[in-house]
């Protein structure tokens, strides 16, 4: 294992490229007057809206849950 904790130069280069793209995305968001958090929140909302709706039954009492045999 090399210094820096990466096992190969290819993995190190991939990590650096990923970090560069993250930094570029953040600087783009800041340049357009939008914080990185707002950008993330907007993307997350879009992602959540594409998911199929599944009812959350965790708040219901145990006895009211439907049991399918």
Image (tube, rainbow, N blue to C red):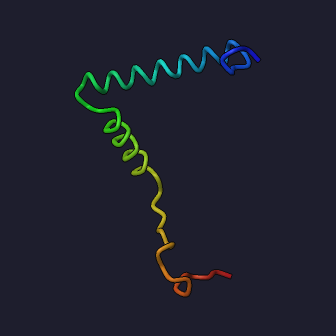
Residue 64 x/y as whole percent: 52, 85
Q: Give the image quarter of residue 36.
A: top left
Residue 42 x/y as whole percent: 33, 41
**Eyeballing the image, is 25 above or below 69?**
above
Q: Give the image quarter of residue 47.
A: top left
Horizontal placement of 44 versus 66: left or right?
Answer: left
In the displayed orientation, state which residue is furthest to the left.
Answer: 33
Horizontal placement of 15 versus 21: left or right?
Answer: right
In the displayed orientation, state which residue is furthest to the right.
Answer: 1
Could you tell me which residue is drawn at 38 percent across and 38 percent down?
40
In the displayed orientation, state which residue is furthest to the bottom.
Answer: 63
Looking at this view, is 9 or 43 the one in front? Answer: 9
**Eyeballing the image, is 63 above or below 17?**
below
Q: Give the image quarter of residue 9.
A: top right
Task: Please give the count of numbered marks on the rendered protein.
Answer: 0
Q: Quadrant of the C terminus?
A: bottom right
Residue 29 x/y as whole percent: 31, 27
Residue 60 x/y as whole percent: 48, 79
Could you tell me which residue is drawn at 50 percent across and 21 percent down?
19
**Eyeballing the image, is 19 above or below 63?**
above
Could you tell me which residue is drawn at 69 percent across and 21 percent down?
5
Q: Quadrant of the N terminus?
A: top right
Looking at this view, is 8 or 65 the one in front? Answer: 8
Looking at this view, is 2 or 51 the one in front? Answer: 2
**Eyeballing the image, is 47 above or below 13?**
below
Could you tell me which residue is drawn at 32 percent across and 22 percent down?
28
Horizontal placement of 56 versus 68: left or right?
Answer: left
């Amino acid at each position: 294992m090399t210094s820096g904790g990466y096992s190969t130069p290819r993995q190190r280069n991939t990590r650096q490229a990923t970090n560069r793209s993250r930094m570029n995305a953040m600087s783009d968001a800041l340049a357009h007057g939008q914080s990185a958090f707002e950008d993330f929140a907007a993307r997350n909302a879009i992602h959540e809206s594409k998911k199929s709706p599944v009812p959350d039954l965790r708040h219901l009492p145990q006895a009211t849950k439907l049991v399918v045999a």
